[in-house]
Amino acid sequence: MSMLTIRRVATVVSNYQEEVAEALGCGRSCLGSCCLPVSKLPLYEFKDGEEKSIKDGVVRSSQEEPEFSFLNNLLLGQWEERMNRGLFRYDVTACETKVIPGKYGFIAQLNEGRHLKKRPTEFRVDRVLQSFDESKFNFTKVGQEEVLFRFEQSNDDMTHYAPGSPVTDDSKSPSVVAINVSPIEYGHVLLIPRILDCFPQRIDHGSFLLALYMAREAADPFFRLGYNSLGAFATINHLHFQAYYLAMPFPVEKAPTQKINMVKGPPDYGVTILEILNYPVRGLVFEGGNTIMDLSDAVADACIFLQNNNIPFNVLISDCGKRVFLFPQCYAEKQALGEVSQELLDTQVNPAVWEISGHMVLKRRKDYEDASEEYAQRLLSEVSLSEERFKEVKVYVLEALGLQEENKCSQEETGQDEEKEAHYEPPHSPLSAPRFPQGCLVSQ
């Protein structure tokens, strides 16, 4: 079958992001405080429960698994409707994609236009936490036609959908799901928690729980959510998660893991923490939890520790919200210090959550045609913390969760050093700081 190539501008996530000759004003029905409070956007309300069934457009409580996910069908139907209206910059389904031969099965995609007409966005890569700047592009400037629906928790034990619902006093700053007009894959959307509060790109407990709820409600193992901190290739400092469908496992989802056994910790909330093995990027995996909030709080606490200690990181939410991968990373630090080879820099690949997970988005045909497992491993090895630094970060992340890892010798003596294949169903001293040149800025 013949393959087609498209041109794209990957860093533009909204049709309102680029400069325009004339100010459009509030008459364009934006998501700002001028227009959103008087709007009527579609509303999906999820319930705080584990079971649901769908009948006549209303999702009702049930002990049986639903035959399909209402949210999944709603999202894809709305997304395709926006595609038919021509709101995307290109047809993402025409992108060339291939699996790179090798043991990892890295996935390569060609996007030759990714570096064309790129609007530079400057952020300090030596600061994970930065104040919101309303003068820069943010999601309140997005047009309402780019919004698929609001995504809110219901006030009862039911899940509801309304094609047009006014913003009420209870939801003056709604959470919304919007298209990414330069999608990486099919169904690529943005989840923007409490949009009018204009949170900077930083994890908090409520927003991370919202992302896990979205993964659960979609109920599709091919639908994953991702998060990039500042310093880890987030390019918009307005709190958001990304999500898209990829009908194959990400390589990191197939990587073996090893359970981290603990000698002390808080009451058992059912969350298991594992370490990724035999993968180019070192990271942690969080699984289980007696409730969805237990898992969410554990991951959010780890992320909050990293961002408060100025350690860039990426997060992948997988397996319908049942597994969460956490990757502290240092590529931008190495880039700023001139420690990344020019060969890798020439590919213009910024390794964010999708690339770290094994989905390589390449901008030049030569790089796509020459893509090899050796290249992907070299790129990702520059992303990963060293073994020594990762061990240090892991200790402090666990301490932040009130946990302490069992001594390795004790694990070997008791036979508890458990390694398992990945399942895929469709001390108190300060941490060492990243080594950035003073006042370093990198254009992303």
Image (cartoon, rainbow, N blue to C red):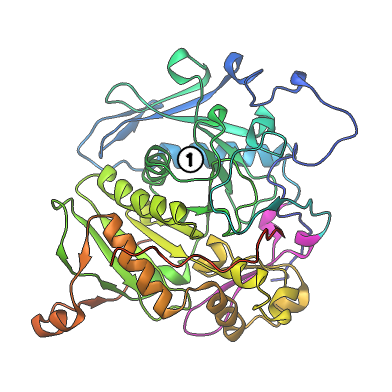
**Which part of the image, by quadrant, shows the N terminus?**
bottom right
User: x and y percent of residue 369 in the render?
Assistant: 72, 80
For badge 1, the amino acid type reads Asn
List the residue tagged with mark 1: 73
Residue 28 visible (yes or no) = yes
Q: For the point 27% across and 63% down, which residue is it?
A: 273
Residue lying at 89% horizontally and 29% vertically, measured from the top left: 22
* Mark 1, other Cα within 10 Å: few <14 / some 14–19 / many ≥20: few
Q: How many marks?
A: 1
Q: Quadrant of the C terminus?
A: bottom right
Q: Is residue 95 left or right of residue 54?
A: right
- The answer to whether any part of residue 424 appears in the image is no
- In front of the other: 322 or 91: 322
Relative vertical location of residue 98 with respect to residue 162 in this rendering, above or below = below
Residue occupying image coordinates x 43% and y 39%: 207
Q: Position of residue 191 (x, y in %)?
A: 52, 40
Is 109 colored magenta in this rendering?
Answer: yes
- Front-most of 207 and 438? 438
**With 161 as the anchor, is 260 left or right in this view?**
left
Q: Is residue 361 above or below residue 305?
A: below
Residue 206: percent from left, percent from top = 38, 37
Please give the range of residues in magenta.
91-115
Tell me the SS state at disc 1.
Answer: helix
